[in-house]
Amino acid sequence: MGRRHTCVDCAVKNSALCRALPAPQLAALYRHSYRRHHPPGRLIGGVDHAEDCFATVLSGVVKLTKSLADGRRQIVALLFPSDFLGRPFAAGGALVAEAATAVELCCFSREYFEELIRNQPQLKQLLLERTLDELDAARDWMFLLGRNNAQEKVAAFILHIWRRMRAADGDARCASVHQQQIDLPLSRSETAEYLGLRIETVSRQLQALRAAGIIETSHGRTMKVQDVRALERIVGPDPVR
Amino acid sequence: MGRRHTCVDCAVKNSALCRALPAPQLAALYRHSYRRHHPPGRLIGGVDHAEDCFATVLSGVVKLTKSLADGRRQIVALLFPSDFLGRPFAAGGALVAEAATAVELCCFSREYFEELIRNQPQLKQLLLERTLDELDAARDWMFLLGRNNAQEKVAAFILHIWRRMRAADGDARCASVHQQQIDLPLSRSETAEYLGLRIETVSRQLQALRAAGIIETSHGRTMKVQDVRALERIVGPDPVR
DNA sequence: CGCGTATTTGAGCATCATCAAGCGCCGTGG
DNA sequence: CCACGGCGCTTGATGATGCTCAAATACGCG
């Protein structure tokens, strides 16, 4: 594929990890990078897979899953545009990365990027802060998985996606902001895997929210959020103390 | 309290974060540090509390909890000797740190240590690797919380503690290793908070393991692990793929 | 010895999982 | 154009696991 893309017109240049790089190193990284498209459902190398690359998510949503032999699966993280995909400095705890929607990645070789992390203090700093944020997020989700009921889990999921999408759009699409419309990046079955529920339970809770007038579902993954406040009330005040 | 301790005879000098510091910086950090004892149950400043300090755990076990106003609580991490306590570069997601057992900490001021992280590449590198490891651990626990039943959760907990204690002891106490004896750092109620269960369920599952001859409980927190293999079998083969 | 706390044990119940249809959408092929 | 089949989602009926409420027991400590 011809290099029709540059960092200059990269959609996430101001939010991705590489924003921490000085121009010369950015240019060098660019020369070691390549873009890659993945259709929904496609397994991505990346985390500790053979393909062995790191990447920045340019568009789409990537899910990180953990599976047991008996078929039990848990999605442990969702990656959105500008998020970093990969596990530096270790083999990675048997995670699998998979495209949830159509995904575009900006990939670089593991060795090259690890070296860059080691030598570029700004990059290392940013990666550290990102990792700390991810740890916070993981712990929030631990609370959700351990302590929230089905209703709260589903409401939290919608709220989570709603906020991420809002943040991603920025001021771009005020129209759709007003319409409160979102497109869930996950199927029912994936949603269940993210929330520690079964697919039927997710479906029922969504119908309950619809019946309460809090959301409007138009079959499939598109929905309108009618009452954000109600969702927030169901989820409850995030933390205490 | 007089400075009767030095880094030279520190029990965790070879495993704690500060091992990454060159001698002069270590000496400087030492001058900014102080030791602190906490009885079991005592609230520690630390994570994003007013007291606002970072620390290395010297002995004992610290629990990190997240609470809701309605009393629901979830322990999101346990910290063992040589682990780092604190949340650099942010306010920390409303976590509370509490002494699970009697705890001894080596504390330093937030500002000083953050500055040290920024300026010492080795320290930053080690902290980054530690944080990535913690993230892996958090995701493992997410799977446990979302997908494992009560039996598996309790077995996983015992195994987890058993391994950490084994690792901590090192070769020190081969006798107790042979006896397979461990002292749980958590009460039943705390164990429940760690596993996303109720106290009664934890108790019942422990009795079930005892009835199966897998552990021997002598009332309270002391137990003998009779059959590690059985525990591993219950927990299941960690991951797949 | 008696009290307070932590743990165990029991009985009934709620929530969510499981099993099983049924439905709507969509692409394929007749 | 419509019949067909597949897939993802919904809906219903039933049941098991873990929660709730309640009480008994065990231990530590004054």
Image: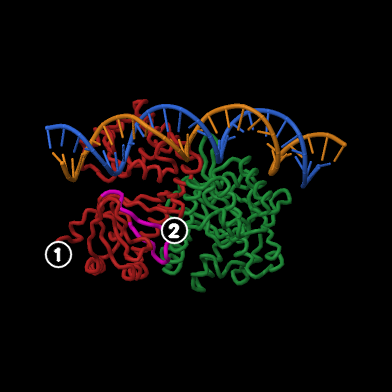
Chain colours: A red, B green, C orange, D blue
Both labels 2 and 1 in a single chain: no
Residue at 49 percent across and 70 percent down: it is B21
Q: Please tell me whether residue A93 belongs to the stretch shown in magenta.
A: yes
Which residue is nearer to you in this view: A190 or B31?
A190
| Amino acid at circle 1 | Gly
The location of residue C28, given as percent across then percent down, is: 18, 45
Residue at 65 percent across and 58 percent down: it is B227
| Identity of the residue furthest to the bottom in this view | B23
Answer with left or right where residue A68 lies relative to residue A225. Answer: right
Residue at 63 percent across and 50 percent down: it is B186
Which residue is nearer to you in this view: A76 or A33?
A76
| Amino acid at circle 2 | Val
Name the residue that disc number 1 marks: A2
Foreground label between 2 and 1 = 2
Secondary element at tag 1 = loop
Secondary element at tag 2 = loop
Crowding near pointer 1: few (<14 within 10 Å), some, many (20+)? few
Q: Chain of mark 1?
A: A
Q: Please tell me whether residue A88 belongs to the stretch shown in magenta.
A: yes
Answer with left or right where residue A114 lies relative to residue C26. Answer: right
The location of residue B41, given as percent across then percent down, is: 63, 47
Q: Main secondary structure of the magenta part?
A: loop
Disc 2 from disc 1: Cα separation: 37 Å
The location of residue A29, given as percent across then percent down, is: 25, 67
Residue range in magenta is: A84-101
**A203 up-or-down from B205: above or below:** above
Name the residue that disc number 2 marks: B240
The location of residue A49, given as percent across then percent down, is: 36, 63
Answer with left or right where residue B221 lies relative to residue A84. Answer: right
Which residue is nearer to you in this view: B67 or B5?
B67
Q: State yes or no: discs 2 and 1 in contact (Cβ < 8 Å).
A: no
